[in-house]
Each structure stands twice: as C-alpha cells, then as structure tokens.
Amino acid sequence: MGQWEADLQEVLDTGVVPGLQFDGATLRLTRQRPQGVEVVAWSLRGDRLQRWTAPVTARGPALQEAWFGSLQLLGNEAAQLRTLDGITGWQVYFWRQNAWSNAQSSGDGVATPGTGTGGTGTPPGTGTAGATTPREALPEGVRVVLR
C-alpha cells in the first residue's frame, strides 16, 4: 500500500493522456519521474492486485503508446508486479466537490491551456501554444476499498 500511496502522490496530468482514470477493473495514472513520466496500471487479476509500469518517457507519442498498451494488459507481462493476494473485489472513490464519488462517474471538466499531443522531442503536456484540451480535473483525494 506504500507503493499505491507513492504512485498517487506523484500523479501528473500531462495533457497528453488522462492523469488518473479508473474503469472498474484497472486504475491507470501518469506518474512524474526524474527522467520524465511513466504510466502505472493497478489491476485486479483473479484474487490478486497487480501493478504494471511502462518505461519512463519524455515524449508525448511514447506516453500515448504506453497508455494504450496499459489498456491491453493480460496480467502476465514481465513488468507486472504482484502486490496483494486474497482480494475478491475493489472499488475506487474520488474526492470531488467536498464529497466522495464513484471514480467511474464524471468529474469536473477543465480546459488545459497550452497542451497538445507533443511531438518528437516535445515533452508531454507541451504542444501548440494557446491550444486547449478539455480534460477531467484530477480529484483532490483517492480512496480504495479492497474486499
């Protein structure tokens, strides 16, 4: 659970991919690292909570590729780390507007100025000056309930 907390403390919304997203099976986040950004995916596989990380990148296209790769995880990838056994289910809640809500419900929309897709050699979160990308605001808190 210390790793879970460390991941959440370093969430970064790059404007290229969502900073934090839960689809009911997997929680995906982008995490700030000294060399760039990494995609982290926490998934429940059978009765086991697993953590997967993509290679750290400082390029928007590589970050997008890692994000899309996290959508196709099978659970047997070399980068999968087994964290907790005996888990029969989980739910994630986000703290938004002074209340806990299901992480799968819509959050607050924000426009992120100056973001784009990031080109070759362009750090994630940078792009066409003045462009705005509608994004879901990061929650103020995250709570996980494990069964």
Image (cartoon, rainbow, N blue to C red):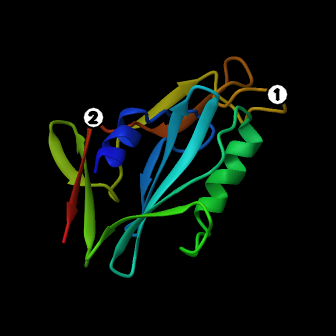
The residue lying at 25 percent from left, 79 percent from top is 88
The residue at the point 65 percent across, 58 percent down is 68
* Three-letter code, disc 1: Gly
Type of amino acid under label 2: Glu
Residue 45, placed above or below residue 84: below
- Which residue in the protein does label 1 denote? 121
Q: Does label 2 or label 1 sit earlier along the sequence?
A: 1
C-alpha separation, residue under disc 2 versus residue under disc 1: 31 Å
Which residue position holds label 2? Answer: 140
Q: Closer to the camera: disc 2 or disc 1?
A: 1
Question: Residue 56's quadrant in the figure?
Answer: top right
Q: Position of residue 134 (x, y in %)?
A: 53, 37
Under circle 1, the secondary element is loop
Which residue is found at the position 74% from the left and 44% from the top? 62
* x then y, percent, for residue 12: 49, 33
The one nearer the camera, 99 or 120, is 120
Q: Identify which residue, 83 or 144, lies in the foreground.
A: 83
List the single residue furthest toward the bottom.
46
Query: Which label sits on residue 73?
Result: none
Q: Nearer the viewer, residue 67 or 115?
A: 67
